[in-house]
Amino acid sequence: MAGNSTHTVTNQPPPLVGYDVFGADLALVEAVERHTDPEVLDEVRAELSVLGRASGSAQVQEWGVQANEHPPRLRTHDRYGHRVDEVEFHPAWHRLLGKGVGAGLTGAWAHPAGHVRRAAGFLVWTQVEAGNCCPLSMTHAAVPALRADPALAAEWEPRLTSTIYDRELRPAGRKPGALFGMGMTEKQGGSDVRANTTEARPLAEEGTYVLTGHKWFCSAPMSDGFLVLAQAPGGITCFLVPRVLADGTRNVFLIQRLKDKLGNRSNASAEVEFDDTWARRVGEEGRGVRTIIEMVAATRLDCALGSAGLMRQAVAQAVHHCAHREAFGGKLIDKPLMRNVLADLALESEAATALTLRLAAAYDDGGEQERAFLRLAVPAAKYWITKRCAPVAVEAAECLGGNGYVEESGLPRLVRESPLNSIWEGAGNVQALDVLRALQREPGALDACLTEIGRAHGADHRLDRAVKDLFTELADLDAVEGRARRLVERLALVLQGSLLVRHAPPEVADAFCASRLGGDRGAAFGTLPTSLDLASVVERARPLV
Protein backbone atom coordinates (compact mmCIF):
# COMPACT_ATOMS: atom_id res chain seq x y z
CA MET A 1 0.00 0.00 0.00
CA ALA A 2 2.84 2.38 0.80
CA GLY A 3 4.09 2.09 -2.76
CA ASN A 4 0.87 3.66 -4.04
CA SER A 5 1.10 6.78 -1.89
CA THR A 6 3.14 8.65 -4.52
CA HIS A 7 0.91 7.64 -7.40
CA THR A 8 -1.75 10.30 -7.19
CA VAL A 9 -2.82 11.25 -10.70
CA THR A 10 -3.26 15.00 -11.12
CA ASN A 11 -3.13 17.51 -13.95
CA GLN A 12 -4.06 14.97 -16.62
CA PRO A 13 -6.84 15.81 -19.11
CA PRO A 14 -9.89 13.58 -19.23
CA PRO A 15 -10.19 11.32 -22.29
CA LEU A 16 -11.74 12.94 -25.33
CA VAL A 17 -14.64 10.51 -25.41
CA GLY A 18 -18.41 10.47 -25.09
CA TYR A 19 -19.12 13.37 -27.43
CA ASP A 20 -20.58 14.11 -30.87
CA VAL A 21 -17.61 14.27 -33.25
CA PHE A 22 -19.78 15.97 -35.87
CA GLY A 23 -21.60 18.43 -33.61
CA ALA A 24 -18.38 19.46 -31.85
CA ASP A 25 -16.80 20.53 -35.16
CA LEU A 26 -18.22 23.99 -35.86
CA ALA A 27 -16.44 24.37 -39.20
CA LEU A 28 -17.91 21.09 -40.44
CA VAL A 29 -21.41 21.80 -39.13
CA GLU A 30 -21.44 25.18 -40.84
CA ALA A 31 -20.15 23.72 -44.12
CA VAL A 32 -22.92 21.11 -44.12
CA GLU A 33 -25.52 23.79 -43.44
CA ARG A 34 -24.07 25.97 -46.19
CA HIS A 35 -24.16 23.29 -48.86
CA THR A 36 -27.37 21.40 -48.01
CA ASP A 37 -30.85 22.17 -49.29
CA PRO A 38 -32.96 23.43 -46.37
CA GLU A 39 -35.63 20.84 -47.19
CA VAL A 40 -33.33 17.97 -46.20
CA LEU A 41 -31.01 19.79 -43.77
CA ASP A 42 -32.70 18.52 -40.58
CA GLU A 43 -32.53 14.96 -41.86
CA VAL A 44 -28.85 15.31 -42.80
CA ARG A 45 -27.92 16.88 -39.46
CA ALA A 46 -29.72 14.14 -37.57
CA GLU A 47 -27.94 11.39 -39.53
CA LEU A 48 -24.54 13.01 -39.00
CA SER A 49 -25.16 13.51 -35.29
CA VAL A 50 -25.97 9.81 -34.91
CA LEU A 51 -22.70 8.94 -36.65
CA GLY A 52 -20.88 11.64 -34.67
CA ARG A 53 -22.05 10.25 -31.32
CA ALA A 54 -21.08 6.74 -32.37
CA SER A 55 -17.66 8.00 -33.47
CA GLY A 56 -17.10 9.70 -30.14
CA SER A 57 -18.24 6.74 -28.05
CA ALA A 58 -15.81 4.75 -25.95
CA GLN A 59 -16.91 1.48 -27.57
CA VAL A 60 -16.33 2.54 -31.17
CA GLN A 61 -13.02 4.18 -30.32
CA GLU A 62 -11.94 0.94 -28.69
CA TRP A 63 -12.81 -0.93 -31.89
CA GLY A 64 -10.42 1.36 -33.72
CA VAL A 65 -7.65 0.53 -31.28
CA GLN A 66 -8.34 -3.21 -31.53
CA ALA A 67 -8.40 -3.19 -35.33
CA ASN A 68 -4.94 -1.62 -35.36
CA GLU A 69 -3.50 -3.81 -32.63
CA HIS A 70 -4.66 -6.93 -34.51
CA PRO A 71 -3.86 -6.29 -38.19
CA PRO A 72 -5.18 -8.56 -40.97
CA ARG A 73 -3.54 -11.90 -41.71
CA LEU A 74 -3.23 -13.63 -45.07
CA ARG A 75 -4.34 -17.26 -45.29
CA THR A 76 -3.33 -18.63 -48.69
CA HIS A 77 -4.31 -22.30 -48.07
CA ASP A 78 -6.71 -24.20 -45.87
CA ARG A 79 -5.67 -27.07 -43.60
CA TYR A 80 -5.94 -29.57 -46.45
CA GLY A 81 -3.71 -27.65 -48.82
CA HIS A 82 -6.41 -26.10 -50.97
CA ARG A 83 -5.72 -22.57 -52.15
CA VAL A 84 -8.22 -20.16 -50.53
CA ASP A 85 -6.53 -16.73 -50.69
CA GLU A 86 -8.42 -15.17 -47.82
CA VAL A 87 -7.61 -12.31 -45.48
CA GLU A 88 -8.66 -12.69 -41.86
CA PHE A 89 -9.63 -9.57 -39.86
CA HIS A 90 -10.21 -8.96 -36.18
CA PRO A 91 -13.93 -8.74 -35.28
CA ALA A 92 -13.47 -5.03 -34.52
CA TRP A 93 -12.67 -4.43 -38.20
CA HIS A 94 -15.96 -5.99 -39.28
CA ARG A 95 -17.87 -3.98 -36.69
CA LEU A 96 -16.31 -0.75 -37.94
CA LEU A 97 -16.88 -1.57 -41.59
CA GLY A 98 -20.46 -2.59 -40.86
CA LYS A 99 -21.14 0.73 -39.15
CA GLY A 100 -19.54 2.66 -41.99
CA VAL A 101 -21.66 0.88 -44.60
CA GLY A 102 -24.74 1.23 -42.42
CA ALA A 103 -24.13 4.99 -42.13
CA GLY A 104 -24.41 5.31 -45.91
CA LEU A 105 -20.73 6.01 -46.59
CA THR A 106 -20.98 4.12 -49.88
CA GLY A 107 -24.38 5.53 -50.87
CA ALA A 108 -23.77 9.14 -51.90
CA TRP A 109 -25.16 8.62 -55.38
CA ALA A 110 -28.63 7.62 -54.18
CA HIS A 111 -29.78 10.53 -51.97
CA PRO A 112 -30.45 14.28 -52.12
CA ALA A 113 -27.37 16.17 -50.92
CA GLY A 114 -25.82 12.72 -50.94
CA HIS A 115 -22.26 13.82 -51.53
CA VAL A 116 -22.22 16.53 -48.87
CA ARG A 117 -23.76 14.28 -46.21
CA ARG A 118 -21.50 11.42 -47.20
CA ALA A 119 -18.37 13.65 -47.28
CA ALA A 120 -19.13 14.99 -43.81
CA GLY A 121 -19.72 11.45 -42.56
CA PHE A 122 -16.48 10.24 -44.14
CA LEU A 123 -14.58 13.09 -42.47
CA VAL A 124 -16.11 12.14 -39.13
CA TRP A 125 -15.62 8.38 -39.51
CA THR A 126 -11.98 8.79 -40.51
CA GLN A 127 -11.35 10.15 -37.02
CA VAL A 128 -12.29 6.79 -35.49
CA GLU A 129 -10.16 4.53 -37.68
CA ALA A 130 -8.91 5.48 -41.12
CA GLY A 131 -8.14 1.99 -42.38
CA ASN A 132 -11.72 0.85 -42.86
CA CYS A 133 -12.36 3.98 -44.93
CA CYS A 134 -10.40 2.43 -47.83
CA PRO A 135 -13.05 -0.15 -48.85
CA LEU A 136 -15.76 2.42 -48.15
CA SER A 137 -14.06 4.85 -50.49
CA MET A 138 -13.43 2.31 -53.25
CA THR A 139 -17.02 1.09 -53.16
CA HIS A 140 -18.41 4.62 -53.30
CA ALA A 141 -16.06 5.59 -56.12
CA ALA A 142 -16.74 2.54 -58.30
CA VAL A 143 -20.27 3.72 -59.12
CA PRO A 144 -19.43 6.43 -61.70
CA ALA A 145 -16.97 4.12 -63.47
CA LEU A 146 -19.53 1.33 -63.72
CA ARG A 147 -22.00 3.75 -65.28
CA ALA A 148 -19.90 3.54 -68.44
CA ASP A 149 -21.81 0.26 -68.92
CA PRO A 150 -25.52 0.76 -68.07
CA ALA A 151 -26.15 -2.97 -67.74
CA LEU A 152 -23.31 -3.41 -65.26
CA ALA A 153 -24.39 -0.33 -63.34
CA ALA A 154 -27.96 -1.62 -63.08
CA GLU A 155 -26.67 -4.93 -61.73
CA TRP A 156 -24.06 -3.63 -59.27
CA GLU A 157 -25.05 -0.15 -58.15
CA PRO A 158 -27.86 -1.25 -55.78
CA ARG A 159 -25.39 -3.57 -54.04
CA LEU A 160 -22.67 -0.94 -53.75
CA THR A 161 -24.98 1.74 -52.35
CA SER A 162 -26.62 -0.67 -49.91
CA THR A 163 -26.44 -0.03 -46.16
CA ILE A 164 -25.99 -3.74 -45.41
CA TYR A 165 -22.53 -5.17 -44.84
CA ASP A 166 -22.22 -8.83 -45.81
CA ARG A 167 -18.70 -10.14 -45.18
CA GLU A 168 -19.21 -13.61 -46.68
CA LEU A 169 -17.46 -14.62 -49.90
CA ARG A 170 -20.30 -15.75 -52.14
CA PRO A 171 -21.78 -14.67 -55.47
CA ALA A 172 -22.63 -11.00 -55.37
CA GLY A 173 -26.06 -11.74 -56.81
CA ARG A 174 -26.95 -13.53 -53.58
CA LYS A 175 -25.79 -10.72 -51.29
CA PRO A 176 -27.78 -7.71 -50.01
CA GLY A 177 -24.70 -5.51 -50.22
CA ALA A 178 -21.27 -5.62 -51.81
CA LEU A 179 -17.90 -3.90 -51.58
CA PHE A 180 -15.43 -2.99 -54.32
CA GLY A 181 -11.67 -2.70 -54.55
CA MET A 182 -9.33 -1.51 -57.27
CA GLY A 183 -6.15 -2.72 -58.98
CA MET A 184 -4.33 -0.34 -61.30
CA THR A 185 -0.61 -0.23 -60.60
CA GLU A 186 1.97 -2.85 -61.48
CA LYS A 187 5.58 -3.39 -60.45
CA GLN A 188 7.12 -1.99 -63.59
CA GLY A 189 4.78 0.96 -64.06
CA GLY A 190 3.45 2.46 -60.83
CA SER A 191 1.48 5.57 -61.76
CA ASP A 192 2.32 5.03 -65.43
CA VAL A 193 -0.59 2.64 -65.95
CA ARG A 194 -0.14 2.65 -69.73
CA ALA A 195 2.98 0.56 -69.06
CA ASN A 196 0.80 -2.22 -67.59
CA THR A 197 1.51 -5.71 -68.88
CA THR A 198 -1.48 -7.65 -67.53
CA GLU A 199 -3.04 -9.26 -70.62
CA ALA A 200 -6.77 -9.53 -71.32
CA ARG A 201 -7.80 -12.23 -73.78
CA PRO A 202 -11.37 -12.10 -75.18
CA LEU A 203 -13.68 -15.06 -74.70
CA ALA A 204 -16.50 -16.16 -76.98
CA GLU A 205 -19.18 -14.44 -74.89
CA GLU A 206 -19.39 -10.75 -75.75
CA GLY A 207 -17.69 -8.52 -73.18
CA THR A 208 -15.99 -11.34 -71.25
CA TYR A 209 -12.24 -11.93 -71.01
CA VAL A 210 -9.64 -13.80 -69.02
CA LEU A 211 -6.79 -11.86 -67.42
CA THR A 212 -3.20 -12.98 -66.85
CA GLY A 213 -0.77 -10.80 -64.94
CA HIS A 214 -0.32 -9.06 -61.61
CA LYS A 215 -1.19 -6.00 -59.57
CA TRP A 216 1.44 -4.49 -57.29
CA PHE A 217 -1.18 -2.73 -55.16
CA CYS A 218 -4.68 -4.14 -54.86
CA SER A 219 -6.88 -2.33 -52.38
CA ALA A 220 -9.32 -4.18 -50.12
CA PRO A 221 -8.60 -7.74 -51.38
CA MET A 222 -11.61 -9.27 -49.60
CA SER A 223 -14.06 -7.20 -51.66
CA ASP A 224 -16.75 -8.70 -53.86
CA GLY A 225 -15.46 -7.11 -57.04
CA PHE A 226 -12.56 -5.08 -58.39
CA LEU A 227 -12.03 -2.61 -61.16
CA VAL A 228 -8.69 -3.35 -62.83
CA LEU A 229 -6.78 -2.21 -65.89
CA ALA A 230 -5.32 -4.65 -68.43
CA GLN A 231 -4.05 -4.71 -72.00
CA ALA A 232 -6.82 -5.91 -74.32
CA PRO A 233 -6.32 -6.25 -78.10
CA GLY A 234 -7.55 -2.66 -78.43
CA GLY A 235 -5.29 -1.24 -75.72
CA ILE A 236 -5.60 -0.43 -72.01
CA THR A 237 -9.12 -1.40 -70.92
CA CYS A 238 -11.09 -1.38 -67.66
CA PHE A 239 -12.47 -4.67 -66.33
CA LEU A 240 -14.69 -5.85 -63.51
CA VAL A 241 -13.19 -8.86 -61.74
CA PRO A 242 -15.67 -10.60 -59.38
CA ARG A 243 -14.16 -12.38 -56.38
CA VAL A 244 -16.70 -15.21 -56.65
CA LEU A 245 -18.29 -16.33 -59.90
CA ALA A 246 -22.04 -16.66 -60.42
CA ASP A 247 -21.93 -20.44 -60.00
CA GLY A 248 -20.33 -20.11 -56.55
CA THR A 249 -16.77 -21.03 -57.54
CA ARG A 250 -13.92 -18.75 -56.55
CA ASN A 251 -12.44 -16.68 -59.35
CA VAL A 252 -8.67 -17.01 -59.77
CA PHE A 253 -7.45 -14.27 -57.45
CA LEU A 254 -4.08 -15.24 -56.00
CA ILE A 255 -2.98 -13.10 -53.06
CA GLN A 256 0.82 -13.27 -52.95
CA ARG A 257 1.33 -11.17 -49.85
CA LEU A 258 -0.03 -8.28 -47.81
CA LYS A 259 1.90 -5.04 -47.73
CA ASP A 260 3.66 -4.23 -44.45
CA LYS A 261 2.78 -0.53 -44.29
CA LEU A 262 3.94 2.39 -42.17
CA GLY A 263 0.38 3.16 -41.09
CA ASN A 264 -3.10 2.11 -42.18
CA ARG A 265 -2.32 -1.09 -40.29
CA SER A 266 -5.88 -2.33 -39.93
CA ASN A 267 -6.46 -2.32 -43.69
CA ALA A 268 -5.21 -5.03 -46.05
CA SER A 269 -3.34 -3.95 -49.17
CA ALA A 270 -2.19 -6.83 -51.33
CA GLU A 271 -0.11 -7.99 -54.25
CA VAL A 272 -2.25 -10.25 -56.42
CA GLU A 273 -1.79 -12.47 -59.47
CA PHE A 274 -4.31 -13.25 -62.22
CA ASP A 275 -4.06 -16.54 -64.10
CA ASP A 276 -6.92 -16.93 -66.59
CA THR A 277 -9.03 -14.84 -64.22
CA TRP A 278 -12.56 -14.22 -65.53
CA ALA A 279 -13.53 -10.59 -66.07
CA ARG A 280 -16.14 -8.41 -67.71
CA ARG A 281 -15.20 -5.38 -69.76
CA VAL A 282 -16.32 -1.97 -68.48
CA GLY A 283 -16.56 0.60 -71.25
CA GLU A 284 -14.82 0.32 -74.59
CA GLU A 285 -11.55 -1.40 -75.36
CA GLY A 286 -8.63 0.98 -75.33
CA ARG A 287 -10.46 3.52 -73.17
CA GLY A 288 -9.69 2.03 -69.79
CA VAL A 289 -8.03 5.10 -68.29
CA ARG A 290 -10.93 7.31 -69.36
CA THR A 291 -13.39 4.79 -67.88
CA ILE A 292 -11.68 4.40 -64.53
CA ILE A 293 -10.75 8.07 -64.15
CA GLU A 294 -14.15 8.86 -62.60
CA MET A 295 -13.37 6.35 -59.87
CA VAL A 296 -9.93 7.86 -59.42
CA ALA A 297 -11.34 11.39 -59.12
CA ALA A 298 -13.79 10.29 -56.42
CA THR A 299 -11.09 8.48 -54.44
CA ARG A 300 -8.83 11.52 -54.73
CA LEU A 301 -11.51 13.65 -53.12
CA ASP A 302 -11.72 11.00 -50.39
CA CYS A 303 -7.97 11.33 -49.85
CA ALA A 304 -8.47 15.04 -49.21
CA LEU A 305 -11.47 14.31 -46.98
CA GLY A 306 -9.53 11.67 -45.08
CA SER A 307 -6.65 14.08 -44.47
CA ALA A 308 -9.11 16.76 -43.36
CA GLY A 309 -10.54 14.25 -40.89
CA LEU A 310 -7.12 13.26 -39.56
CA MET A 311 -6.17 16.92 -39.14
CA ARG A 312 -9.41 17.67 -37.34
CA GLN A 313 -8.88 14.82 -34.90
CA ALA A 314 -5.26 15.85 -34.29
CA VAL A 315 -6.30 19.45 -33.62
CA ALA A 316 -9.21 18.36 -31.41
CA GLN A 317 -6.88 16.21 -29.30
CA ALA A 318 -4.29 18.99 -29.01
CA VAL A 319 -6.80 21.70 -28.06
CA HIS A 320 -8.60 19.38 -25.63
CA HIS A 321 -5.33 18.48 -23.93
CA CYS A 322 -4.22 22.09 -23.62
CA ALA A 323 -7.62 23.19 -22.30
CA HIS A 324 -7.20 20.91 -19.29
CA ARG A 325 -3.44 20.71 -18.75
CA GLU A 326 -1.83 23.26 -16.41
CA ALA A 327 1.77 24.42 -16.58
CA PHE A 328 3.70 27.43 -15.33
CA GLY A 329 0.76 28.73 -13.33
CA GLY A 330 -2.12 28.39 -15.76
CA LYS A 331 -3.88 26.41 -18.47
CA LEU A 332 -1.74 25.66 -21.50
CA ILE A 333 -4.49 26.92 -23.80
CA ASP A 334 -4.14 30.40 -22.23
CA LYS A 335 -0.38 30.63 -22.75
CA PRO A 336 0.32 33.02 -25.65
CA LEU A 337 2.85 30.78 -27.37
CA MET A 338 0.76 27.60 -27.13
CA ARG A 339 -2.30 29.56 -28.23
CA ASN A 340 -0.37 30.62 -31.33
CA VAL A 341 0.48 27.01 -32.15
CA LEU A 342 -3.07 25.79 -31.64
CA ALA A 343 -4.55 28.61 -33.72
CA ASP A 344 -2.14 27.89 -36.57
CA LEU A 345 -3.14 24.22 -36.54
CA ALA A 346 -6.83 25.11 -36.36
CA LEU A 347 -6.53 27.30 -39.46
CA GLU A 348 -5.10 24.42 -41.45
CA SER A 349 -7.90 22.12 -40.33
CA GLU A 350 -10.73 24.55 -41.02
CA ALA A 351 -9.39 25.47 -44.46
CA ALA A 352 -9.22 21.78 -45.40
CA THR A 353 -12.78 21.18 -44.19
CA ALA A 354 -14.15 24.17 -46.09
CA LEU A 355 -12.56 23.18 -49.39
CA THR A 356 -13.41 19.48 -49.28
CA LEU A 357 -17.08 20.12 -48.47
CA ARG A 358 -17.23 22.66 -51.29
CA LEU A 359 -15.99 19.97 -53.67
CA ALA A 360 -18.60 17.52 -52.39
CA ALA A 361 -21.28 20.14 -53.04
CA ALA A 362 -20.05 20.43 -56.63
CA TYR A 363 -20.66 16.69 -57.06
CA ASP A 364 -24.20 17.14 -55.77
CA ASP A 365 -24.83 19.99 -58.20
CA GLY A 366 -23.62 17.98 -61.19
CA GLY A 367 -23.88 20.88 -63.63
CA GLU A 368 -21.38 21.58 -66.39
CA GLN A 369 -19.79 24.52 -64.53
CA GLU A 370 -19.35 22.47 -61.38
CA ARG A 371 -17.91 19.51 -63.28
CA ALA A 372 -15.37 21.86 -64.82
CA PHE A 373 -14.57 23.23 -61.36
CA LEU A 374 -13.96 19.72 -60.03
CA ARG A 375 -11.60 18.87 -62.89
CA LEU A 376 -9.05 21.38 -61.62
CA ALA A 377 -9.98 21.79 -57.96
CA VAL A 378 -9.91 18.09 -57.02
CA PRO A 379 -6.25 17.42 -57.92
CA ALA A 380 -5.24 20.80 -56.46
CA ALA A 381 -7.04 20.06 -53.19
CA LYS A 382 -5.76 16.50 -53.10
CA TYR A 383 -2.21 17.77 -53.57
CA TRP A 384 -2.29 20.52 -50.96
CA ILE A 385 -4.54 19.17 -48.20
CA THR A 386 -2.86 15.78 -48.06
CA LYS A 387 0.55 17.48 -47.96
CA ARG A 388 -0.47 19.51 -44.90
CA CYS A 389 -1.69 16.50 -42.92
CA ALA A 390 1.65 15.09 -41.76
CA PRO A 391 3.08 18.33 -40.30
CA VAL A 392 -0.23 19.04 -38.57
CA ALA A 393 -0.31 15.59 -36.97
CA VAL A 394 3.30 15.83 -35.80
CA GLU A 395 2.83 19.30 -34.32
CA ALA A 396 -0.38 18.24 -32.59
CA ALA A 397 1.44 15.32 -31.00
CA GLU A 398 4.08 17.74 -29.74
CA CYS A 399 1.36 19.78 -28.04
CA LEU A 400 0.80 16.76 -25.78
CA GLY A 401 4.50 16.58 -24.98
CA GLY A 402 5.76 13.10 -24.11
CA ASN A 403 2.17 11.89 -23.80
CA GLY A 404 1.73 12.47 -27.52
CA TYR A 405 4.55 10.03 -28.28
CA VAL A 406 2.85 7.22 -26.38
CA GLU A 407 0.54 4.85 -28.26
CA GLU A 408 -2.27 5.13 -25.73
CA SER A 409 -2.76 8.80 -26.65
CA GLY A 410 -3.79 7.85 -30.19
CA LEU A 411 -1.53 10.51 -31.70
CA PRO A 412 1.13 8.06 -32.97
CA ARG A 413 -1.56 6.31 -35.03
CA LEU A 414 -2.55 9.66 -36.55
CA VAL A 415 1.11 10.45 -37.28
CA ARG A 416 1.65 7.11 -39.03
CA GLU A 417 -1.52 7.54 -41.05
CA SER A 418 -0.85 11.16 -41.99
CA PRO A 419 1.43 10.67 -45.06
CA LEU A 420 -0.78 8.02 -46.65
CA ASN A 421 -3.30 10.14 -48.55
CA SER A 422 -0.54 12.15 -50.16
CA ILE A 423 0.93 8.95 -51.61
CA TRP A 424 -2.19 6.95 -52.54
CA GLU A 425 -4.28 7.64 -55.63
CA GLY A 426 -1.43 9.55 -57.25
CA ALA A 427 1.37 11.16 -55.25
CA GLY A 428 2.12 14.88 -55.25
CA ASN A 429 3.81 15.10 -58.63
CA VAL A 430 1.00 13.13 -60.28
CA GLN A 431 -1.56 15.61 -58.92
CA ALA A 432 0.51 18.62 -60.00
CA LEU A 433 0.88 17.24 -63.51
CA ASP A 434 -2.83 16.52 -63.64
CA VAL A 435 -3.51 20.18 -62.86
CA LEU A 436 -1.20 21.18 -65.71
CA ARG A 437 -3.05 18.89 -68.10
CA ALA A 438 -6.36 20.44 -67.11
CA LEU A 439 -4.96 23.94 -67.59
CA GLN A 440 -3.61 23.12 -71.02
CA ARG A 441 -6.48 21.03 -72.39
CA GLU A 442 -9.60 22.22 -70.58
CA PRO A 443 -9.77 26.02 -70.34
CA GLY A 444 -13.27 25.79 -68.89
CA ALA A 445 -11.78 24.23 -65.74
CA LEU A 446 -9.66 27.30 -65.05
CA ASP A 447 -12.59 29.62 -65.78
CA ALA A 448 -14.72 27.71 -63.27
CA CYS A 449 -12.05 27.90 -60.56
CA LEU A 450 -11.45 31.60 -61.15
CA THR A 451 -15.18 32.23 -60.97
CA GLU A 452 -15.28 30.50 -57.58
CA ILE A 453 -12.27 32.44 -56.32
CA GLY A 454 -13.65 35.70 -57.71
CA ARG A 455 -16.74 35.50 -55.51
CA ALA A 456 -14.58 36.93 -52.73
CA HIS A 457 -13.05 39.72 -54.83
CA GLY A 458 -12.55 42.91 -52.84
CA ALA A 459 -13.25 41.31 -49.47
CA ASP A 460 -9.59 41.04 -48.39
CA HIS A 461 -6.62 42.87 -49.91
CA ARG A 462 -4.24 39.98 -49.18
CA LEU A 463 -6.46 37.54 -51.03
CA ASP A 464 -6.76 39.95 -53.96
CA ARG A 465 -2.97 40.26 -54.11
CA ALA A 466 -2.55 36.49 -53.98
CA VAL A 467 -4.99 36.11 -56.88
CA LYS A 468 -2.92 38.59 -58.91
CA ASP A 469 0.20 36.54 -58.16
CA LEU A 470 -1.66 33.43 -59.33
CA PHE A 471 -2.53 35.20 -62.59
CA THR A 472 1.17 35.95 -63.06
CA GLU A 473 1.98 32.26 -62.65
CA LEU A 474 -0.76 31.26 -65.08
CA ALA A 475 0.35 33.79 -67.69
CA ASP A 476 3.62 31.94 -68.25
CA LEU A 477 3.02 28.25 -68.85
CA ASP A 478 6.26 27.73 -70.80
CA ALA A 479 8.52 25.25 -69.02
CA VAL A 480 5.90 25.16 -66.28
CA GLU A 481 6.49 21.58 -65.14
CA GLY A 482 9.43 22.48 -62.91
CA ARG A 483 7.27 24.95 -60.94
CA ALA A 484 4.05 22.96 -61.06
CA ARG A 485 3.97 22.37 -57.31
CA ARG A 486 4.32 26.08 -56.63
CA LEU A 487 1.44 26.83 -59.00
CA VAL A 488 -0.85 24.16 -57.53
CA GLU A 489 -0.10 25.27 -53.98
CA ARG A 490 -1.09 28.83 -54.83
CA LEU A 491 -4.27 27.68 -56.53
CA ALA A 492 -5.31 25.61 -53.50
CA LEU A 493 -4.51 28.42 -51.06
CA VAL A 494 -6.52 31.06 -52.91
CA LEU A 495 -9.45 28.63 -53.17
CA GLN A 496 -9.28 28.09 -49.41
CA GLY A 497 -8.86 31.81 -48.80
CA SER A 498 -11.87 32.67 -50.94
CA LEU A 499 -14.06 30.20 -49.04
CA LEU A 500 -12.92 31.37 -45.60
CA VAL A 501 -13.28 35.06 -46.43
CA ARG A 502 -16.87 34.44 -47.53
CA HIS A 503 -17.98 31.93 -44.92
CA ALA A 504 -15.71 31.71 -41.84
CA PRO A 505 -15.78 34.04 -38.83
CA PRO A 506 -13.73 37.22 -39.45
CA GLU A 507 -10.99 36.19 -37.02
CA VAL A 508 -10.43 32.93 -38.90
CA ALA A 509 -10.40 34.56 -42.34
CA ASP A 510 -8.12 37.35 -41.11
CA ALA A 511 -5.60 34.92 -39.62
CA PHE A 512 -5.63 32.70 -42.72
CA CYS A 513 -5.14 35.56 -45.15
CA ALA A 514 -2.42 37.19 -43.03
CA SER A 515 -0.41 33.99 -42.68
CA ARG A 516 -1.11 31.86 -45.76
CA LEU A 517 -1.64 34.61 -48.34
CA GLY A 518 0.01 37.68 -46.83
CA GLY A 519 3.24 35.95 -45.83
CA ASP A 520 3.14 37.18 -42.21
CA ARG A 521 4.27 33.87 -40.78
CA GLY A 522 7.38 31.80 -40.17
CA ALA A 523 8.18 28.33 -41.47
CA ALA A 524 6.92 26.44 -38.40
CA PHE A 525 3.50 26.32 -36.77
CA GLY A 526 3.03 28.86 -33.99
CA THR A 527 4.50 31.82 -35.86
CA LEU A 528 1.29 33.76 -36.54
CA PRO A 529 1.29 37.53 -35.98
CA THR A 530 0.24 38.21 -32.40
CA SER A 531 -2.02 41.09 -33.44
CA LEU A 532 -4.63 38.54 -34.56
CA ASP A 533 -7.54 37.29 -32.43
CA LEU A 534 -5.97 33.89 -31.83
CA ALA A 535 -8.01 33.09 -28.72
CA SER A 536 -11.23 33.09 -30.77
CA VAL A 537 -9.66 30.89 -33.44
CA VAL A 538 -8.64 28.34 -30.81
CA GLU A 539 -11.95 28.42 -28.98
CA ARG A 540 -13.78 27.73 -32.25
CA ALA A 541 -11.67 24.60 -32.74
CA ARG A 542 -12.20 23.31 -29.19
CA PRO A 543 -14.34 20.15 -29.00
CA LEU A 544 -16.85 20.62 -26.21
CA VAL A 545 -17.52 17.34 -24.44
Image (spheres, rainbow, N blue to C red):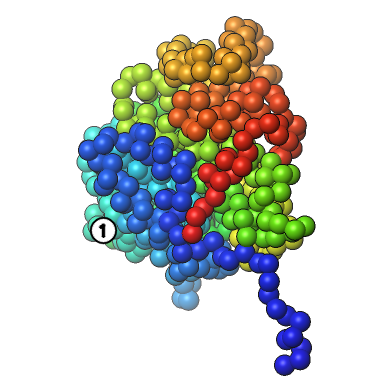
> Is 440 on the left-hand or right-hand side of 417?
left
Q: In the depicted view, which residue is nearer to us: 131 or 522?
A: 522
Corner quadrant of residue 15: bottom right
> Is 309 on the left-hand or right-hand side of 363?
right
Helix, strand or loop at disc 1? loop
> Is 479 on the left-hand or right-hand side of 214?
right
Query: Can you say which quadrant of the picture contains the N terminus?
Result: bottom right
Residue 217 spot, x, y in % from top left: 54, 46
Residue 11 spot, x, y in % from top left: 68, 67
Residue found farthest to the front: 329
Q: In the depicted view, which residue is nearer to us: 310 or 455?
A: 455
Q: In the depicted view, which residue is nearer to us: 349 or 204?
A: 349
- Specify whether residue 107 is in view: no
Say which amino acid is labelled 1.
Lys
Mark 1 surroundings: few (<14), some (14-19) or many (≥20) residues within 10 A: some
Residue 184 versus residue 75 in the image, above or below: above
- Specify whether residue 30 is in view: yes
> Is 36 on the left-hand or right-hand side of 429?
left
Q: Please tell me which residue is depicted at 49% across the width and 55% down the height of the picture.
A: 544
Q: Please tell me which residue is depicted at 72% across the width and 44% down the height of the picture.
A: 336
Residue 178 spot, x, y in % from top left: 32, 53
Q: Please tell me which residue is depicted at 68% across the width and 71% down the height of the picture.
A: 10
Q: Which residue is mark 1?
A: 175
- Number of dots carrying numbers: 1
Residue found farthest to the bottom: 1
Residue 521 spot, x, y in % from top left: 72, 30
Q: Please tell me which residue is depicted at 63% across the width and 38% down the height of the picture.
A: 534
Residue 324 versus residue 120 in the image, above or below: below
Residue 403 versus residue 126 in the image, above or below: below
Q: In the depicted view, which residue is nearer to us: 498 or 197?
A: 498
Residue 486 versus residue 47 in the image, above or below: above
